[in-house]
Image (cartoon, rainbow, N blue to C red):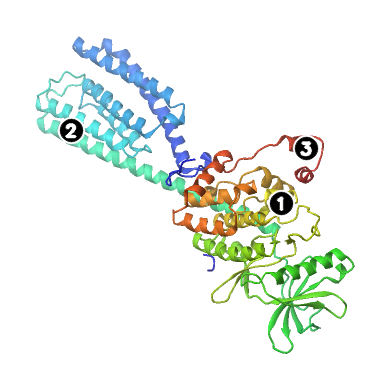
Amino acid sequence: MHPQPSPTPKAMPVETDAGDDLRGVLLGEEIARARVFFQAFFLLAVIMGGFVPILPGPTWLRVAAGIVLATGASLCVVVLRRIRSRKLYTPGLVVALGVSCAVVGTACIHYVGPFSAGAMVLSIGIYFFGTSGSRRAGPVTWGVVAGLYLISSVGVASGVFPDVSLFPIAGTAPVTRWFQVIMSQVIFAITLYLARSNRQAMQGAIARIHRIGMEMRQRDAQLAEARRELDKALRPGDGRHSGETVGAYKLGQLVGRGGMGEVYRGTHVSTGKLAAVKLLHPYLLDNPDHVRRFLREAKVTAAVRTEHVVEVLELGETKEGSPFLAMELLEGHDLGWHLRKVGKLGLPAVIELVDQLAGALTKMREEGIVHRDLKPGNLFLTDSIPARWKVLDFGLSKLAGAGGTLTRDAAIGTPSYMAPEQVQGQADHLTDLYAVAAIVYRALTGSPPFAGEDAAMILFHVVYSQPAPPAQFVQLPSDVELVLAVGLAKQASDRFGSVDELAVALRRAADADLDDRTRAKGWSLLKKAPWGLTRKPKAIVKAAAKGKPLVASLIA
């Protein structure tokens, strides 16, 4: 497991930012080309129409040509007005325009001369509609142009139709006429092939640029997170307590140091069993709150008996009176290490992670424990067979019914993974569920829901913003995005009822079998607050105007 209401239709994609959506980019480019195309052909129709009265030929033919050109110019005007709105530029409209332009263009070329240079204008039309996002527009336009032109050119070449065009072919050899008939069809077909090939090449190029953009955003997010979430552990070496015996363990190498204490590799003096022994920093002994927090971590950790929480082996005091905690020694790396190494995990690996977390958090909930600091650095993947995920560091945990916490309900935790209610000092099992959903977002996309160097700004976005669309970073099944929307809901009541429910929903979403109730809730949440939306509350604006710190205004 190393890194590697009415039902909503399953096939409907989750809405994303149009500026970063591949189809949105291509549609915008096509509409821009359409404006130029129809402006040019409007100008061409007007110029030709101006010459019709003075050109030679029967009166009826010149009148008919004028009507066709006027129709073409009117069509251009209607289209230019219609495509001001992106919503009106639909695949059906493009097909209809292709057919209309093919009929008007072929009629004009019959007047000019099917064997004249003017026939090349038809190739321009085929190319334009061939590069359209509509798969039908190009082939349909080509079919109409090729069919009508074939009738016109064969009729004139064979003498069935009288050649009354501006550029007649009188005097040319029959073989020359038929050569032109055949080569025109070949050129039309090649033009369609080049147009569709160009469209595919353009899609591929934009997709590559989009993918590079996603990778750059992932790296930027990972860098920002790494700067805030550097490992606290120092390089292994001797510490001040190396060689001492505390409780039943002789201390060896220093394997890590944090804000509360140091961790040593310990060996049981009788059995030789290895352990990780954590000692409180000596300079913290004079602060009763730090001592109680250290002891509480030991109590909480020991209370949760499951294979997915590190096992407590012994709790005691050193000869100097410093408390120590002996725990099972884990071999492996935390999730933060894995994510920094590979960027993101595959969906199967994330599903397995959440399944195992659900077992630990369910047991914690039964014991009335809220972790309050779930993050990649506190989830450890062992090198055992089978590999297991374990929850670490209960230093900020909260015991239900314990008469308050040592932090007096302050906003504690890691900003990128804190739930909105946690920013205001409130926490329960749904707070941990939010953190798990945030970890899933980070593991799948390569970016935490909210990142940056400024903790206050991160907290602001936690409360008032939606995470960036997952599609900016990675392509996920739409059902998985809906599960993330529910898990990351701002209101705790809108989330899943437990991490077990989140785990089940995530597994079903990966199989495109998400239940209708969860799917409908996800769509409802995204409709109210789409990915990337930031609300601008009046309270924050007023607080800023008064010079009140952002964090204070959030917690107040």
Residue 99 vs residue 14: left or right? left
Residue at 59% in and 66% down: 359
Give neighbour class at mark 1: few <14, some 14-19, many 20+ (Cα, 10 Å). Answer: many
Q: Nearer the viewer, mark 3 or mark 2?
A: 3
Q: Quickly name the residue at label 2.
A: 180
Q: Quickly name the residue at label 3.
A: 544
Are dots 1 and 2 in contact, CB under 8 Å? Answer: no
Look at the image and tell me in which quarter the C terminus lies.
Answer: top right
Residue 535 vs residue 512: left or right? right
Q: Is residue 321 visible?
A: yes
Give neighbour class at mark 3: few <14, some 14-19, many 20+ (Cα, 10 Å). Answer: few
* Residue extending farthest right: 286
Determine the CA span between mark 3 and mark 2: 76 Å
Residue 77 vs residue 251: left or right? left
Which of these two is toward me, 290 or 282?
290
Under circle 2, the secondary element is helix
Amino acid at dot 2: Gln
Give neighbour class at mark 2: few <14, some 14-19, many 20+ (Cα, 10 Å). Answer: some
Q: Nearer the viewer, mark 1 or mark 3?
A: 1
Which of these two is toward me, 108 or 91?
91
Of the numbered discs 1 and 2, the one sitting upstream in the chain is: 2
Q: Is residue 389 above or below residue 398?
A: below
Q: Position of residue 178 (x, y in %)?
A: 13, 33
Q: Is residue 128 above or below residue 238?
A: above
Under circle 1, the secondary element is helix
Q: Position of residue 313 (x, y in %)?
A: 71, 78
